[in-house]
């Protein structure tokens, strides 16, 4: 029997899931996680559906979405449990990879100190580079016309970047969980439409930016070894097939 085949009161549900009663009360109050049932005395009762909803909330919160936006996202199109799990896996894998590189750089610097020396500038520089890696995209700029890129940056503010990043995170997770689907199917076509719309929003239909983006992705063999694409090759292939199928319709 599944642990969540029966209903749990709020304190029991909090203990079983590792969240606090206060958090559950807050989620209920703002309409983010309403308990499935109530006892005759009015006490909250949680079950399997609430556990799955909580996992979706935690996944979106983990990748940086605020609670108000999580509520809107789940009301518009709830995530499946597998999508939520894969979203968390993607972020954790990227962080683990970064930490692995950081530990390697720290070990090298520490070894020099243990031998009675001092970490050289190169060792410290490597540590700094690794720790700053998530925010370092300067290497991409060489693929773009610099005048066009400068103008583009002036029109691409941090608020826009934050919004687009969140939309990409949600979309990539959904695409990764849909690779088994028919690329010509309705859902795949909807995913491809959202994907291509986000690309168009970035390029703003500017030929210089579009050509720079094409050069960037055509040169993947020369990308920095530490750089990890936010999506798999399979996801990219799936979207390409879905886009092509859409053109033939």
Image (tube, rainbow, N blue to C red):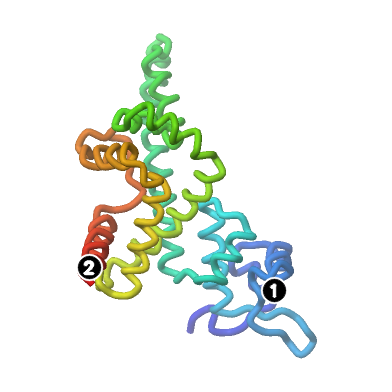
| Quadrant including the C terminus | bottom left
Residue 69 in the image: above or below residue 202: below
Whole-percent x, y for residue 91 in the image: 43, 50
> Residue 174 at what x, y percent from top left?
39, 64
* Label of residue 121 in the image: none
Q: Position of residue 97 (x, y in %)?
A: 37, 41
Provide the residue designation for mark 2. 245
Q: Nearer the viewer, mark 1 or mark 2?
A: 2
Residue at the far top: name it.
117
Q: Is residue 26 left or right of residue 115?
A: right
Residue positioned 64% across, 60% down in the render: 68
Q: Residue extending furthest bottom?
A: 40
Tell me what residue is drawn at x 55 percent, y 69 percent. 74
Picture quadrant where residue 115 is located: top left
Q: Residue at x 42, y 21 (%)?
A: 110
Q: Is residue 120 above or below residue 210?
A: above
- Between disc 1 and disc 2, whose residue precedes? 1
Circle 1 residue: 10
In the rendered view, does 76 fall on the left or right side of 172? right
* Residue nearer the viewer, 105 or 130: 130
In this rendered view, identify the residue nearer to me: 20 or 59: 59
């Amino acid at each position: 029997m599944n642990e969540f085949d029966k209903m749990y009161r709020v304190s029991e549900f909090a203990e079983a899931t590792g969240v606090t009663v206060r958090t559950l009360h807050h989620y209920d109050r703002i309409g983010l996680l309403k308990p499935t049932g109530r006892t005759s005395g009015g006490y909250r009762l949680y079950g399997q559906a609430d556990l799955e909803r909580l996992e979706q909330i935690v996944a979106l919160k983990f990748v940086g979405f605020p609670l108000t936006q999580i509520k809107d996202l789940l009301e518009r199109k709830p995530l499946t449990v597998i999508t939520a799990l894969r979203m968390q896996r993607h972020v954790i894998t990227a962080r683990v990879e970064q930490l692995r590189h950081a530990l390697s750089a720290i070990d090298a610097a520490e070894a020099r100190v243990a031998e009675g020396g001092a970490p050289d500038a190169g060792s410290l520089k490597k540590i700094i580079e690794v720790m700053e890696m998530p925010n370092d995209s300067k290497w991409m700029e060489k693929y773009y016309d610099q005048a066009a890129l400068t103008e583009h940056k002036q029109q691409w503010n941090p608020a826009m970047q934050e919004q687009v990043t969140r939309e990409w995170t949600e979309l990539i997770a959904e695409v990764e969980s849909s690779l088994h689907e028919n690329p010509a199917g309705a859902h795949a076509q909807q995913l491809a439409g959202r994907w291509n719309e986000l690309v168009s929003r970035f390029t703003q239909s500017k030929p210089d930016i579009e050509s720079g983006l094409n050069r960037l992705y055509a040169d993947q063999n020369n990308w920095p070894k530490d750089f990890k694409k936010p999506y798999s090759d399979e996801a990219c292939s799936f979207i390409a097939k879905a886009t092509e199928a859409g053109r033939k319709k």
